[in-house]
Image (cartoon, rainbow, N blue to C red):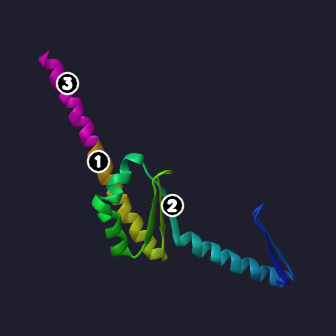
Amino acid sequence: ADSIDVDKSSNVLRIRGSPEAIAKAKEMINQKVQQYVSEHTIIDIDPEDVAALIGPKGATISGIQDSTGAKIRINKRDFVVQISGEERVVEAAKLKIDLVLEKSKHEREIKVREEEERRQSVQKEQ
């Protein structure tokens, strides 16, 4: 390609050159985008799961990072988890995070059931 211009305000990428050079530039850009997508994942989480995912003194999230090699950031304001690293590392971290989130959800459901049972037994006693 003769030139590649990026207009950040409109998110437009302009490629100029011969048809062959433009095709090659598009192919290279698409490869980079695909690589980025495979190496970065975002997971929306329930606000109630943040503490479980972080763990005591950060132990849970640190353990996932250490065991997988992924870089994990938890955005507590938007309730989003960002995972980055090689594709296999991202997938491994995502699986471990999914397990923690499922366990947290299950524990919340048990607490809700126990609380409901407690309320029902108090009502029966009255």
Residue 73 in the image: above or below residue 30:
above
Tell me the distance, in whole angstroms, between the alpha carbons under discs 3 and 1: 21 Å
Gap between marks 2 and 1 measured at Cα? 22 Å
Q: Position of residue 46 (x, y in %)?
A: 42, 48
Q: What span is in magenta?
A: 109-126
Type of amino acid under label 3:
Gln
Mark 2 vs 1, N-terminal side = 2
**Residue depicted at x 15% and y 24%:** 121
Image position, residue 95 (x, y; %):
38, 64
Q: Secondary structure at mark 3?
A: helix
Q: Which mark is residue 106?
A: 1
Q: Position of residue 90 (x, y in %)?
A: 45, 71
Q: Secondary structure at mark 2?
A: strand
Which residue type does callout 2 highlight?
Ile
Question: Which residue lies under the disc numbered 3?
Answer: 120
Q: Is residue 39 left or right of residue 16?
A: left
Using the image, tell me which numbered label, if any, was put on residue 42.
Answer: 2
Marks 3 and 1, the one that precedes in the sequence:
1
Q: Is residue 83 magenta?
A: no
Question: Label 1 is placed on what type of residue?
Answer: His
C-beta proximity under 8 Å, tags 3 and 1: no
- Along the horizontal axis of the image, is 49 left or right of 125? right
Mark 2: few, some, or many residues within 10 Å (few <14, many ≥20)?
Answer: some
| Residue 101 percent across, percent down from the top left | 35, 54
* Vertical order, 65 against 42 (above or below): below
76 or 126: nearer the viewer: 76
